[in-house]
Amino acid sequence: MAVDTSFYKSAMSEEIRDEGRAEGRAEGLLLVLGVRGVALTDADREKITTCTDPQLLHRWLQRAATASSAEEVFRTS
């Protein structure tokens, strides 16, 4: 008996995986910034926790490794 795996290749499945990636990266970003002592406003925290773009969160997480301020993390360039 063959198992139908089409769901795992579907757009909906990819969206669910992206949501999980975004949530995990947001948690990691908050952790790194907290450990490094980077001050965050409530607006900064909301920006992080409501972001659903895993690639953007990944960029922010990379910057958080060396940033000394939230502004450095969120810069647009």
Image (spheres, rainbow, N blue to C red):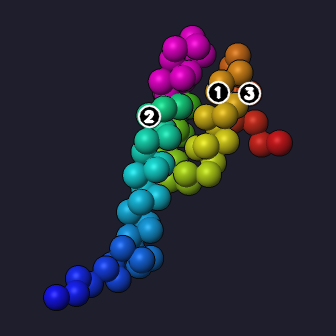
| Secondary structure of the residue carrying numbered label 2 | helix
* C-alpha distance separating marks 1 and 2: 12 Å
| Secondary structure of the residue carrying numbered label 1 | helix
Count residues near mark 3 (Cα–Cα under 10 Å), then give few for <14, some for 14-19, many for 20+.
Answer: some
Amino acid type, residue under disc 2 in the picture: Glu
Q: Which residue is mark 2?
A: 27
Amino acid type, residue under disc 3 in the picture: Glu
* C-alpha distance separating marks 3 and 2: 18 Å
Q: Which residue is mark 1?
A: 64
The first of marks 3 and 1 along the sequence is: 1
Which stretch is magenta? 30-41
Total marks drawn? Answer: 3
Amino acid type, residue under disc 1 in the picture: Ala
Nearer to us: label 3 or label 2: 2
Q: Is residue 74 left or right of residue 11?
A: right
Counting from the top left corner in percent of width and height, residue 23 is at 42, 45
The first of marks 3 and 2 along the sequence is: 2
**For residue 37: magenta?**
yes
